[in-house]
Structures are given as C-alpha cells and as structure tokens.
Amino acid sequence: MIFVGLLFLFHASMSLQYHVPIASQHRDSVLSVRDGDGELHPNRIATVDDQSTDIHLGQHDAVSKARLGERCGPGKRKCESYLCCSPAGYCGMTAAHCMSPDCQLGYGTCDADKVPEGKSTKRIQRPHIGGVPYGEVIVTCKVPYTFAMTYDDGPNEFTRDLLDILDKYQAKATFFITGINSGKGQIDDFTRPWGSLIQRMHYSGHQIASHTWSHQDLTASRKLRKQQILKNEAALRNIIGGFPTYMRPPYSKCDEDCLRDMDQLGYHVISFNIDTADYINDDPDKIQLSKDIVDKALTSPSLDGRPYLAIGHDIHAQTVYNLTEHILQRVNDAGYRAVTVGECLEDPRDNWYRWDYRSA
Ligand SMILES: [Zn+2]
C-alpha cells in the first residue's frame, strides 16, 4: 500500500514539475487502482487528489466524462454512460458508434454490454464428453469424403436464403454464431428474425456453434473471454434450450491462456483447413477466386477422400448467392458429403450441446 501511495505522489510531483496538463490517464490510473483494490488507504488517495485539484485548473475536465462528439478511447476520457465510444474515438449514439465488435468497450456503453435474459449458464456442469479433444485447435476433419462447410458471424439478412440453398442440396453445415455484432441486435431478441433462423438451423440438422457474444479478440483478458462465452451461451440457451460445445475464436485468435479457458469451459476449438477467402472476394468479379480455392482442393490428384473443414461467412452476399451453390455442386461431383463439423469428426449429435434444464 505504501508503495502504491508513493507511486501516486511521484505521479503528482511529475505533473507539478513539468506543468503537464492533467491527463485523463493520470486520473484513470488512480481510479483503476482504486477499482481493483478496495484496500487502498483512503487518506492517502484524498491527499493526492486534493493536491491535484488545488493546483491544476481544468481538473474537472479531466475527471468528467466526455460528451457527445468529444474524443474518447485509450489515453483519452470515457464517454458519458449513455454514449458509445466509436472505433475512431468519438462519443455518440448512432449504430456506427455503438455496434460491436469495433465500439470501444470500457470507454462508454456498447451494444455488447447488453446481457441476455435469464440465468447465467456459468454453473452448468461441463464434462468433457465424447472423443473429440477439448481446448486444443482442431484444423481438420476425420471421416473420409466429408466436407464440413462452416459459416461465421451470422445470422444475417442473407441467412434465410442460405438455409434454402442448403435444403435444396440436402446439405448440412455448421454455423458459428455471434450473439450481437454488426448492428444486428441480440440474437435472442425475438422481435428480430435471428432467433427463429437459429431454431430453423437447429431443427434442420445443421450444427449451432459459438463465435462469441460480440466478436472481440479473446486474447485481451480472461474476464472478457468468459463474458464473451457465457453471454453467447445464455442467448443461445434462450433460443434452443442449450448451448454448444463447439466454438471458433474471432480472428482465429486464441493463445495458450485462452485455450486453457476454453478447455475449462468445455469447448472444442475449431479452425479450418480450407479458407475460402470469401470475405475478400465478396464481389461478382472476384468470387471466382474463392471458387478456385475450393475447386483446387477437391480436384487434387492426391485427394483420396481427404476430409475438409472450410470457412466462409453468411454475412456476405456472394458467399450465399454464388459461392455456396458452387461448393455444394463440387462436393457432390467429388463424391463427398456436405456435413456438420460434429459429423465430420465422428462426434454424435448429443455431444454438440449442453442443455439447460433449470427453470427460468
Ligand atoms: Zn468472425
């Protein structure tokens, strides 16, 4: 405690000596330590704060929250609690300010701060059922002549049509679902179409998997990782009665600590061995490049039934209205089956979810 107190005095004397305008980060460092450590000696904090207030004009600007249109973000202030800090670092209330994943968490409000209704899933047991490994990155399938097409970041406005296309080919796919991103609102808000689309996926035999609540980088902190997983679980539980045992980390980022947490939370971490690169080819003139990637894989002379796990995104028009049908035709032509990730890993459907049998 003495060390921390001395540190504050040192900071205060530095700003006195150099006449540095009170920076928000100086004040924030006091606040953040205070938030994280309730044992700080109150007199010592008061002394430092009092000195700063007496000497520096503009102190109130430093501690006040940033208002509409003002700057926010790292090294700057937080927005007033009802405002969002945009990706570019301005306080505001529009969808562009507030939507995840780029709304700046912790510097104001964000749509990602919403919490799904009902009980948290954190107390639900998570036994490691089945033979598929938990907490380690899986890049390929197991069953010969299977092709597991996966779609990340949805559902979205195109997803209904994608489900129709999959039905037409009697193909199954896996959806790595994000709970609230790209301004679509919560997936379990039944005034929107997402919940019923997810139910349709589920009852049609597709696999529902997690792509986290608001598509944040899971390597940022343990607290964020758990929130991101648990909130998406609660939202999916509100839709299908349970939550998945399969997940894909946003940006494919999950370091050792993250993998350890996914292991504890009971998740299979799914990567891919074909990247369709659809997100950079979402243009009628470019999507052929994505088709070429799949064609090359499925016409390889050494193919011999090698199973594939492919990534795409149902938030892109060309993926849904152009690429998917091409892939499904090629899969059929090559004598392959379009299946879920669970099926290509020979994991029975019962193992894909954990059900929440508690009353609401
Ligand atoms: Zn994603």
Image: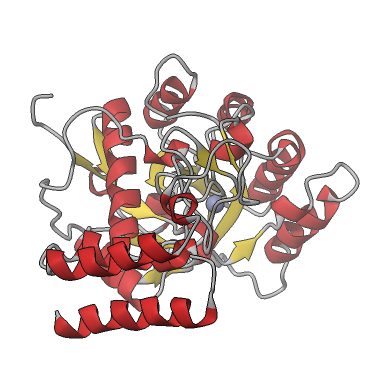
Return the residue nearer the eye: 257 or 14: 14
Q: Position of residue 62 (x, y in %)?
A: 47, 55
Residue at x-position 73% and y-position 36%? 317
Residue at x-position 20% and y-position 28%? 118
Q: Position of residue 344 (x, y in %)?
A: 43, 56
Q: Is residue 176 left or right of residue 259?
A: right
| Looking at the image, residue 136 lies above or below residue 272 | below
Q: Is residue 305 left or right of residue 53?
A: right
Q: Is residue 151 left or right of residue 131?
A: right
| Looking at the image, residue 77 lies above or below residue 357 | below
| Looking at the image, residue 1 lies above or below residue 278 | below
Residue at x-position 61% and y-position 51%? 89
| Looking at the image, residue 203 lies above or below residue 317 | above
Instruction: Pick the quarter of the image with the C terminus.
Output: top left
Q: Position of residue 149 (x, y in %)?
A: 56, 49
Residue at the far top in the pictured view: 191
Return the residue nearer the eye: 10 or 94: 10
Instruction: Pick the quarter of the image with the N terminus.
Output: bottom left
Residue at x-position 40% and y-position 74%? 255
**Where is residue 158, by image quadrant?**
top right
The answer to whether residue 68 shows anywhere in this view is yes
Return the residue nearer the eye: 135 or 90: 90
Q: Position of residue 44 (x, y in %)?
A: 18, 71
